[in-house]
Amino acid sequence: MPTSDPGPSVKDDELYEKLRGEGNSKEKSARIANAAAASSRSDIGRKGGHSDAYEDWTVDELHDRAAEVGIEGRSTMKKDELIEALRQS
């Protein structure tokens, strides 16, 4: 699989390409690579935490989160569609 420049928004190109090679989506690979660049790779899986269920989020919050992970077509999605797209990313 030929590598390509993921763009300036990806902070750890090497990890991004490895994740893409494993079959992860562009959005998920970029999210993980950027999180790893912000701290250490070994800390990424241990962050933990809690977030409310997507059903408890407002549509505006869901749109913001969808923008963060790069979901296309989010501006026309209804709440249920946003939740489904976020869960699949």
Image: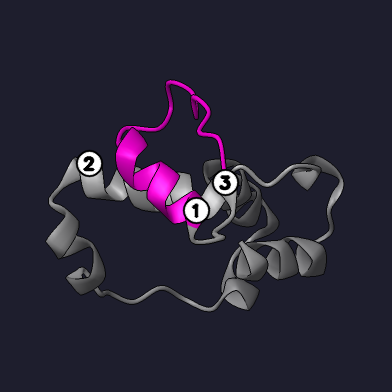
**Residue at the disc numbered 2:** 37
Examine the rendered structure and indicate whether residue 23 appears above or below residue 73. Answer: below
Disc 2 residue type?
Answer: Ala
Whole-percent x and y of residue 46?
18, 72
**Real-space CA distance between mark 3 and mark 2, rounded to the nearest whole angstrom:** 16 Å
Whole-percent x and y of residue 44?
23, 62
| Quadrant in the picture for residue 38 | top left
User: Dot 3: few (<14), some (14–19), or many (≥20) neighbours within 10 Å?
Assistant: some
Q: Foreground: 68 or 19?
A: 19
Residue under the image location 54 percent in, 78 percent down? 53
Q: In the image, 53: left or right of 48?
A: right
Label 1, secondary structure: give it: helix
Residue under the image location 43 percent in, 54 percent down? 19
Disc 3 residue type?
Answer: Lys
Q: Quadrant of the C terminus?
A: bottom right
Disc 1 residue type?
Answer: Gly
User: What is the number of the mark on residue 2?
Assistant: none
Q: Choose the circle earlier in sequence order: 1 or 3.
A: 1
| Quadrant in the picture for residue 87 | bottom right
User: What is the number of the mark on residue 26?
Assistant: 3
**Residue at the disc numbered 1:** 21
Q: Choose the circle earlier in sequence order: 1 or 2.
A: 1
Examine the rendered structure and indicate whether residue 7 appears above or below residue 71. Answer: above
Q: Foreground: 18 or 89?
A: 18
Magenta highlight range:
1-21
* Residue 10, magenta (yes or no): yes
Whole-percent x and y of residue 66?
62, 50
